[in-house]
Amino acid sequence: MGFVCVRSLGGIDSGMSDSPSTSNQPNPEDRILKLEESSGYTDHHIEILSGEIAQINKAMLGLTRRFSQIEARLSEISDRVGEDAPNVPPPHSAGPDIPKDPL
C-alpha cells in the first residue's frame, strides 16, 4: 500500500512511481557519511559503557571479598557465643558478704 504526500507544486504523489524523487532522498554519499557518524558515536558509547561495566565488576569483586570476610567473622563469633559464659552475679545484687568485683 502506498502513501500519499502533497508536493510543494500542489500535485499528489501516491508513492508508487518507479522514479525516485531526488528532493526527498539524500544522495548516497550523505547517507554513507551519516551512517559512519552514527557508527562512530555508537563505538564511542560502547567504549564508555564497557569502561563502566569494568569498574562495576571490579567493585563487585571487592564487595564479594569483603562479604566473605564478614561472613567468616560472624561465623567465628557465633561459634564463640555457644561457649559457656562465666556465671557472675550483677553488681547491684552484691550483698555485704559478696564482693562487688568477683573477678
Image (tube, grey):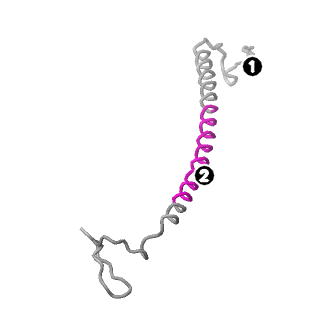
Which marked residue is nearer to the observer: mark 2 or mark 1? 2
Residue type, label 1: Lys
Q: Which residue is mark 1?
A: 100
Crowding around mark 1 (Cα neighbors within 10 Å: few <14, some 14 to 19, many 20+) is some
Q: Which residue is more in the foreground, 22 or 40?
A: 22
Q: Which residue is mark 2?
A: 44
Residue type, label 2: His
Q: Which residue is more in the foreground, 14 or 41?
A: 14
Badge 1 marks a residue whose secondary structure is: loop
Q: Which residue is more in the foreground, 72 or 48?
A: 48
Residue 29 placement, left or right of 16? right
Residue depicted at x 27% and y 76%: 14
Is residue 91 shown above or below 8?
Answer: above
Considering only order in the chain, which callout, 1 or 2, is on the residue closer to the N terminus? Answer: 2
Magenta residues, start to end: 35-62
Cα distance in 3D space between marks 2 and 1: 74 Å
In the picture, the quarter occupied by the C terminus is top right
Residue depicted at x 64% and y 29%: 66
Residue 101 placement, left or right of 12? right
Q: Main secondary structure of the magenta part?
A: helix
Q: Quadrant of residue 70?
A: top right
Tell me residue 20's x, y (percent).
Answer: 36, 71
Badge 2 marks a residue whose secondary structure is: helix
Residue depicted at x 32% and y 78%: 5
Tell me residue 48's x, y (percent).
Answer: 61, 48
Tell me residue 42's x, y (percent).
Answer: 55, 53
Q: Residue furthest left?
A: 1
Q: Which mark is residue 27?
A: none
Q: Quadrant of residue 76?
A: top right
